[in-house]
Image: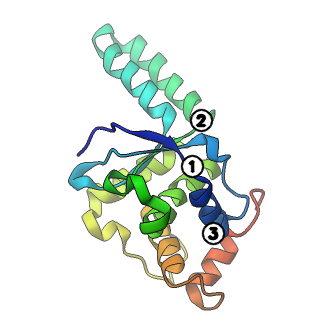
Amino acid sequence: MRIPTRFRLLSEEEYRLALEVFNQNLPSKRRIIVTDGSGISDRAFTIPISLILIGAVTVMAIPFGLLTALIVFWSLCMASCLNPGYLMNVGKAYPNLGSEHPSLLIHEITHVWQGERAFFSITYVLNSCFHQILKGHSAYSYDIQSQKYSVEQEAQLIEDWFTAGKPETGPLWQYVKSKVKASRED
């Protein structure tokens, strides 16, 4: 685990690469902040920025009772709905994410896309935590025949399609075409 020490906006190159996968189904690059922080076992993770602000308030509110906790919880829900942005914590990949770690970029950008599609952006974070706690590393394994995936399985599927050269045939492409390439309204 590493506390972030450097922050930057997503670069033009990184954003262009992400748009190759997600078309215009992403927020403005000004809403995506990249850091050199990392999670447990130095793993990358992406969260709505509002979680950081509300999380700090939650920790401070615990001693002040249930009413404060309920107010903070409601604030968390509202902030998640009105999410101002995303924090992509990519660890050592920070300085050259797009050029040397494009698959990681696509995996983490998938979480941004998932957050944008959800009514409450926090839901993809909760889904990810639940499945990683329940299944460990196998939380990323998917059965292409299933068509119903956890957020980590979906991110891995999209990453695998991207890593394979973005083929426009096969079962991965069928999923990407129907779910990712579709417009926001679909």
Residue assigned mark 3:
21
- Quote the CA–CA distance across marks 2 and 1: 9 Å
- Residue farthest to the bottom? 169
Q: Is residue 77 left or right of residue 20?
A: left
Q: Circle 1 is placed at which residue position?
A: 115
Residue 16 in percent (x, y) is at: 65, 62
**Closer to us: mark 3 or mark 2?**
3
Question: Which amino acid, by three-letter code, is at mark 2?
Answer: Asn
Instruction: Say left or right for 26 vs 120.
Output: right
Which is more toward the observer, 2 or 180? 2
Q: Residue at x 50, y 84 (%)?
A: 164
Q: Earlier in the sequence, mark 3 or mark 2?
A: 3
Which type of secondary structure does the marked residue at label 1 adopt? Answer: helix
Q: Residues within 10 Å of mark 2 (few under 14, many from 20)?
A: many
Q: Give the x, y percent position of residue 134.
A: 28, 59
| Tally of numbered tags | 3
